[in-house]
Amino acid sequence: MNLSSILRVYLYLSLILLIFLVAISFNSLRVISMNGARTIRTAEDRFLQDNLETEIKEVLINARNKQKFTEQQIEAVSDKMIRFEQILKGHNLRSMELIRNEWEQLKFRHAPNPDKIIQEFDVLHNIVNNMVLDDLHKRQANTERDTKRIQKIKLGIGSLILTMFIAALYLDSQLKKQRDEFMKKSISNETLKNLADSIGQEAMVRVIQAFMSELPKAETSINQLISEKNIDELHKVGHRNKSASQTVGAMELAELFKQLEVAPKLETAIDLNTKINSESNIVMSELQEQITSMH
């Protein structure tokens, strides 16, 4: 597996990881937002409890040792008790049960003494305060934990995006290079134009046709000389065909023949022969297109 393939796999996996990290980040933000909303709601409920508790105590204290609670007072306290219990719904508190039972007995007495129920309210007040504080501490700890997690995730996402960007740039450069190589023609149109301007289009066609007829012979000659291990004659073939290739604008092929001209050993010539055969096929095809387009 080459580097480009490895980077493609890395980009795919990084994209999956990036989506996963973003999902975790959004989830942590949602939890932080929910904790904030719940904290505000808890504070609002506590303020409402304090107000209800104060209002109930005022009625009870004002009625201490009097003849009897009025119907209006009973209705007001009972209503506030219900609202108070609704706020504490879900908490099984012994003090709340005692307060409820005590009120049921107290509201019909003559000369009621509210001291016991007020004491139970004070006990409940402390219990609820401790519950609220514990809940706030837990929410604060969770918020701090999620905030730190988001900071780490942000750092991870930033680093991941940076490496993905670098990998993408590299892959883009490789794809552009491959595209340029694919689009690059083996024949120089500028060279052919100059040749046509110099000797005329008909003469240029004859030059191209002559080159196309000789090029297969050169390939056959190279194969023969390789089998004979004749490096000196291979140099001569490279020299002759280098100039001919340059004349028709086959610059890449001319470069290969130039390398054959100075090949230091037979193994080099064998390797060049493979490249020459491949490039010759392309050159022959492009030159044939040039001739066809001129007619």
Image: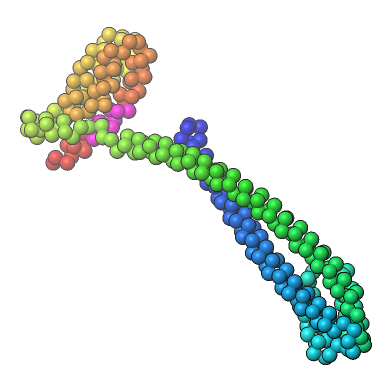
Q: Is residue 48 left or right of residue 69?
A: left
Front residue (pair 84, 242): 84
Residue 67 lies, in percent from the top left, at: 90, 89
Q: Is residue 73 visible?
A: yes
Please report the residue visible at 66 percent of the width from the left and 65 percent of the height from the top: 40
Is residue 13 depicted above or below 190 in this figure? below
| The image quarter in which residue 271 lies | top left
* Colour setup of the view: rainbow
Q: Is residue 227 visible?
A: no
Residue furthest to the bottom in view is 71
Q: Is residue 16 left or right of residue 83?
A: left
Percent x, y of residue 276: 30, 24
**Residue appearing at x 78%, y 74% in the figure:** 53
Query: Which part of the image, by quadrant, shows the C terminus?
Result: top left
Task: Determine if the magenta segment contains residue 25.
Answer: no
Front one among 55 and 245: 55
Q: Residue at x 81, y 77 (%)?
A: 57
Q: Is residue 24 above or below residue 44?
A: above
Q: Say whether residue 251 is left or right of residue 19.
A: left
Magenta stretch: includes residue 284: yes
Q: Which is nearer the eye, 123 or 25?
A: 123
Which range of residues does the magenta coloring cover? 278-286
Asked where in the image residue 178 lies, by quadrant, the reply is top left
Query: Magenta span: helix, strand or loop, mainly?
Result: helix
Q: Is residue 135 above or below residue 214?
A: below
Give percent across and percent down for residue 76: 78, 85
Count every numbered label the image shows and give the total. 0
> Residue at horizontal 32%, vertical 18%?
223
